[in-house]
Image (cartoon, rainbow, N blue to C red):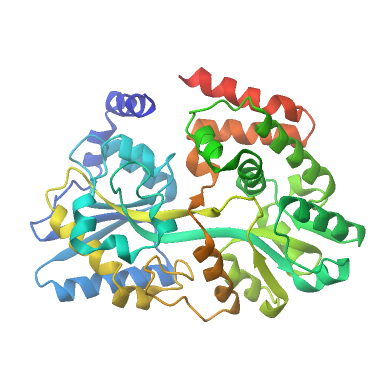
Amino acid sequence: MRVKKMLAAVAAAGVVATLAACGGSSGGAGGDDELTVWMLTLEGSQKTAMDTLVSDFEAAHEGVTVKVETRSTDAHKDALRQVAGTDSGPDVYWYWEGPGLGGELVEAGLSKDLTAEYEKYGWGDRFGEATLSNITRYGGYHGVPFTQQAEAIYYNKELFAKAGVTAEPTTYAELEAAAAKIKAAGITPIEFGGTVNWHVMRLLDSLLETNCGSETFDQLVTAKTSWDTDCVGRSFDQLKTWGGEYLNEGFQGVSNDESSQLFYTGEAAMAYEGTWFDSQVVDNGMDPANVGIFKFPTGTDRLYGFGEGFYINAATKKADQAAEFLDFITSTEEQKKVVGVWSPISVNTAVTPATDNPLHELWPPLYDAAKGFYLNNDQNLTLAQTTEYWRIMNSVLTGETAPADAGAQMQKFIESES
């Protein structure tokens, strides 16, 4: 229903025509031997890496050219929503894999089911189980994995030792006990920046996974069960405890970049960040040997994070060429050239992780142990639902909403959309 409404709104506004008038490409708009690929804006090393993949493919496929069109994040989302249900889209598009974004376009019919291509190229053996979990969640195979970003707790080993925390927490109770010890030692347990809602959201998402479990978490974010339930109330109650007891003072008035300084300077013992944080730790003067990484102890087998992949437009007439392109750029030989650019770990399991940063070596065991991922909820939920989720989160943290009422408020909003 949500997708139908989206497409209806797009059609009413005539935005497809507007896109075409402004020069937007159409599926297979170039010659028979030109592939059109839509991506986010590429800069620096990412642009260099993509140029390498494209030029290598063109060199190996005489006469074939690949035209990469890039847009900013919101413009990219808008452009793909505008062409959903039409033949005006690209041959291949890059997108996030979560149901609130990638799944929305799958539901709208923009993504081609690649079951036959997975069998032809053996892609099921190329990518890991966790990486494929968001490709197969819609039935069949939608998309080819390109990055898998994971998020976990970075911690300062010296501060843990100073507070008497002698081991990485493996349960939620141990995590909370560690935070209490760190606070008692006069150290800020964990830093967050509240002016960007998605930063504190990581804590709330993980509390929901902890208290509700994997199955119920997925049902919540797909509106298949009610948010007005005990595990949701317990999660918001714990969020309020963390906000009042263990987060940096004044966290709601600073950004994530500002709060990260507390970790870099040794004023906060933990930071909830992702694979991209490895380089930032080193760039900001920390000794990586003094930094550890552990999975938020949810009690489930899943790792927190999100995937990004390339999808073949269901309307393209060049599906075979598009599949050949995706097979080429995710091959072992090509991925060895670009590993570390988008993530320290390639989605191709035959590729050795990047080693230019000691922290990169801490991630493979976490990936290997994971039985899938639970996604950031701003990728799970619609834009309107995400906005409401953040409003309730902040309202609980400021004391305006009782934790026990938070789930009912979220459920009321979701029902108002139907």
Residue at x 36% of width, y 50% of height = 135
Residue 277 locus on image (x, y percent): 60, 66
Rendered view: 239 above or below 337: above
Residue at x 26% of width, y 37% of height = 109
Tell whether 223 sits left or right of 393.
left
Tell whether 98 sits left or right of 201.
left
Instruction: Quarter of the image for the C terminus: give it.
Output: top left
Residue 285 locus on image (x, y percent): 69, 77
Task: Please state the total of marks drawn on the protein image.
Answer: 0
Instruction: Quarter of the image for the N terminus: give it.
Output: top left
**Between 102 and 131, which is closer to the camera in this rendering?**
131
Rendered view: 69 above or below 78: below
**Between 199 and 45, which is closer to the camera in this rendering?**
199
Residue at x 69% of width, y 80% of height = 289
* Residue 81 visible to an observer of this rendering: no
Rendered view: 142 above or below 120: above
Tell whether 264 sits left or right of 374.
right
Residue 365 locus on image (x, y percent): 55, 69
Residue 237 locus on image (x, y percent): 76, 36
Residue at x 31% of width, y 28% of height = 7
* Residue 321 visible to an observer of this rendering: yes
